[in-house]
Image: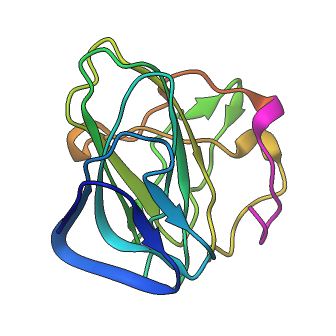
Amino acid sequence: ERVENILRLKSGILTTNTNVFIVANTDSNAISFETDSSYINGNLRKYVTEGTQYNLPVGSSEYCEPVIVKITSLGDLSYLDASFINASPGSVPNGLEVDGTLITEFLDFGYWKIIPNNDFNSVYDITATSNGHSNGGTITESHALFFRPDEGEWQNYGTHNNTTQSGTNYNP
Protein backbone atom coordinates (compact mmCIF):
# COMPACT_ATOMS: atom_id res chain seq x y z
CA GLU A 1 0.00 0.00 0.00
CA ARG A 2 1.21 3.52 -0.77
CA VAL A 3 -0.01 6.88 0.54
CA GLU A 4 0.95 10.02 -1.37
CA ASN A 5 -0.61 12.52 1.04
CA ILE A 6 -1.34 11.93 4.74
CA LEU A 7 -1.76 8.69 6.67
CA ARG A 8 -4.08 9.16 9.65
CA LEU A 9 -4.11 6.31 12.12
CA LYS A 10 -7.15 6.88 14.33
CA SER A 11 -7.75 3.55 16.05
CA GLY A 12 -6.50 0.04 15.70
CA ILE A 13 -3.35 -1.60 14.50
CA LEU A 14 -2.44 -1.70 10.82
CA THR A 15 -0.67 -5.04 10.25
CA THR A 16 1.46 -5.30 7.11
CA ASN A 17 2.82 -8.85 7.52
CA THR A 18 5.67 -9.04 4.96
CA ASN A 19 4.34 -6.13 2.88
CA VAL A 20 5.67 -2.57 3.17
CA PHE A 21 3.36 0.38 3.84
CA ILE A 22 4.84 3.39 2.00
CA VAL A 23 4.29 7.03 2.92
CA ALA A 24 5.72 9.05 0.02
CA ASN A 25 4.90 12.52 1.41
CA THR A 26 8.08 13.99 3.01
CA ASP A 27 6.21 16.46 5.25
CA SER A 28 6.67 16.03 9.00
CA ASN A 29 2.90 15.65 9.47
CA ALA A 30 2.46 13.03 6.73
CA ILE A 31 1.81 10.40 9.43
CA SER A 32 -0.46 11.12 12.34
CA PHE A 33 -1.45 8.71 15.06
CA GLU A 34 -3.90 9.70 17.73
CA THR A 35 -3.27 7.10 20.43
CA ASP A 36 -0.81 4.43 21.48
CA SER A 37 -3.28 1.92 20.07
CA SER A 38 -2.99 3.38 16.54
CA TYR A 39 0.20 2.27 14.81
CA ILE A 40 1.78 -0.03 12.24
CA ASN A 41 2.65 -3.60 13.17
CA GLY A 42 5.02 -4.47 10.38
CA ASN A 43 6.99 -2.57 7.77
CA LEU A 44 6.79 1.18 7.24
CA ARG A 45 8.71 3.07 4.56
CA LYS A 46 8.83 6.82 5.09
CA TYR A 47 10.31 9.18 2.51
CA VAL A 48 12.29 11.96 4.19
CA THR A 49 13.82 15.37 3.61
CA GLU A 50 16.46 17.46 5.35
CA GLY A 51 15.70 19.50 8.45
CA THR A 52 12.55 17.55 9.30
CA GLN A 53 11.51 15.41 12.26
CA TYR A 54 9.35 12.34 11.70
CA ASN A 55 7.22 10.24 14.03
CA LEU A 56 7.28 6.62 12.96
CA PRO A 57 4.48 4.78 14.79
CA VAL A 58 5.64 1.16 14.60
CA GLY A 59 5.13 -1.63 17.09
CA SER A 60 4.24 -5.23 17.77
CA SER A 61 0.84 -6.87 17.96
CA GLU A 62 0.80 -5.86 21.65
CA TYR A 63 2.47 -2.44 22.03
CA CYS A 64 3.26 0.74 20.16
CA GLU A 65 7.06 1.21 20.02
CA PRO A 66 7.29 4.71 18.49
CA VAL A 67 10.44 6.12 16.93
CA ILE A 68 11.28 9.74 16.21
CA VAL A 69 13.89 10.49 13.54
CA LYS A 70 15.22 14.00 13.00
CA ILE A 71 17.07 14.45 9.71
CA THR A 72 19.87 17.00 10.17
CA SER A 73 21.70 16.40 6.89
CA LEU A 74 20.09 14.41 4.10
CA GLY A 75 23.18 13.32 2.17
CA ASP A 76 22.08 10.52 -0.16
CA LEU A 77 19.17 9.42 2.02
CA SER A 78 15.70 9.21 0.40
CA TYR A 79 13.72 7.01 2.78
CA LEU A 80 13.83 4.94 5.96
CA ASP A 81 12.30 1.51 6.42
CA ALA A 82 11.17 1.04 10.02
CA SER A 83 9.70 -1.85 11.98
CA PHE A 84 9.72 -3.32 15.46
CA ILE A 85 10.88 -6.91 15.83
CA ASN A 86 9.19 -8.67 18.76
CA ALA A 87 12.02 -11.14 19.36
CA SER A 88 15.23 -11.36 21.33
CA PRO A 89 18.05 -9.28 19.89
CA GLY A 90 20.44 -11.99 21.08
CA SER A 91 23.20 -11.70 23.62
CA VAL A 92 25.28 -8.61 24.30
CA PRO A 93 28.74 -8.84 22.69
CA ASN A 94 31.65 -8.77 25.12
CA GLY A 95 32.97 -5.29 25.80
CA LEU A 96 29.96 -3.34 24.48
CA GLU A 97 29.81 -0.07 26.40
CA VAL A 98 28.45 3.43 26.23
CA ASP A 99 30.52 6.27 27.67
CA GLY A 100 32.39 3.86 29.93
CA THR A 101 29.26 2.03 31.13
CA LEU A 102 29.41 -1.68 30.30
CA ILE A 103 26.19 -2.98 28.74
CA THR A 104 25.18 -6.32 30.23
CA GLU A 105 21.75 -6.98 28.70
CA PHE A 106 19.38 -5.83 25.99
CA LEU A 107 15.68 -5.17 26.50
CA ASP A 108 13.76 -8.45 26.51
CA PHE A 109 10.70 -7.48 24.45
CA GLY A 110 12.31 -6.77 21.10
CA TYR A 111 14.18 -4.22 19.01
CA TRP A 112 13.70 -1.74 16.19
CA LYS A 113 14.90 -2.27 12.68
CA ILE A 114 15.53 1.04 10.93
CA ILE A 115 17.16 0.75 7.53
CA PRO A 116 18.05 3.78 5.42
CA ASN A 117 18.03 3.28 1.66
CA ASN A 118 21.40 5.09 1.46
CA ASP A 119 22.76 7.08 4.39
CA PHE A 120 26.06 8.15 2.85
CA ASN A 121 26.82 11.64 4.24
CA SER A 122 23.51 11.64 6.16
CA VAL A 123 23.17 12.80 9.76
CA TYR A 124 20.10 12.01 11.84
CA ASP A 125 19.05 11.57 15.46
CA ILE A 126 16.87 8.67 16.58
CA THR A 127 14.72 8.56 19.70
CA ALA A 128 12.88 5.35 20.56
CA THR A 129 10.35 4.54 23.26
CA SER A 130 10.18 0.94 24.42
CA ASN A 131 7.09 -0.69 25.86
CA GLY A 132 6.46 -4.26 26.97
CA HIS A 133 9.88 -5.08 28.34
CA SER A 134 10.45 -6.34 31.88
CA ASN A 135 14.13 -5.48 32.30
CA GLY A 136 14.42 -1.73 31.73
CA GLY A 137 17.10 -1.21 34.32
CA THR A 138 17.46 1.73 36.65
CA ILE A 139 20.73 3.19 35.36
CA THR A 140 19.67 5.73 32.73
CA GLU A 141 23.21 5.88 31.35
CA SER A 142 22.68 2.29 30.18
CA HIS A 143 19.70 3.27 28.04
CA ALA A 144 21.10 3.49 24.53
CA LEU A 145 20.49 2.53 20.93
CA PHE A 146 22.88 0.15 19.20
CA PHE A 147 23.61 -0.65 15.58
CA ARG A 148 23.91 -4.05 13.96
CA PRO A 149 25.17 -3.93 10.37
CA ASP A 150 23.84 -6.68 8.11
CA GLU A 151 22.66 -8.80 11.06
CA GLY A 152 26.25 -8.93 12.43
CA GLU A 153 27.44 -8.01 15.94
CA TRP A 154 25.73 -5.21 17.85
CA GLN A 155 27.93 -2.14 18.27
CA ASN A 156 27.86 1.38 19.62
CA TYR A 157 27.53 3.80 16.74
CA GLY A 158 27.06 7.54 16.66
CA THR A 159 26.96 9.91 19.59
CA HIS A 160 25.36 9.04 22.92
CA ASN A 161 24.18 11.76 25.30
CA ASN A 162 23.51 10.67 28.91
CA THR A 163 21.46 13.81 29.60
CA THR A 164 18.81 12.70 27.09
CA GLN A 165 18.32 9.23 28.57
CA SER A 166 15.39 8.46 30.83
CA GLY A 167 13.29 5.62 32.08
CA THR A 168 12.83 3.07 34.81
CA ASN A 169 12.59 -0.69 34.94
CA TYR A 170 9.03 -0.79 33.58
CA ASN A 171 8.56 2.73 32.26
CA PRO A 172 10.98 3.58 29.44
Residue at 55% x, 73% y: name it.
64
x, y percentage for residue 33?
A: 54, 68
* Magenta stretch: includes residue 171: yes
134 left or right, relative to 106:
right
Q: Is residue 165 above or below residue 162?
A: below
Residue at 61% x, 32% y: name it.
97
Nearer to the camera, 33 or 70: 33
Pick the quarter of the image with the N terminus: bottom left
Q: Does residue 90 appear in the picture of this structure?
A: no
x, y percentage for residue 168?
A: 83, 61
Residue at 44% x, 65% y: name it.
58
Residue 40: quarter of image: bottom left
Q: Is residue 66 above or below residue 123?
A: below
165 left or right, relative to 9:
right
* Magenta stretch: includes residue 18: no
Nearer to the camera, 49 or 64: 49
Image coloring type: rainbow
Nearer to the camera, 27 or 74: 27
State whether the magenta stretch is mostly helix, strand or loop.
loop
Nearer to the camera, 60 or 31: 31
Residue 125: quarter of image: top right
Magenta span covers which residues? Answer: 163-172
Q: Does residue 161 appear in the picture of this structure?
A: yes
Residue at 31% x, 81% y: name it.
15
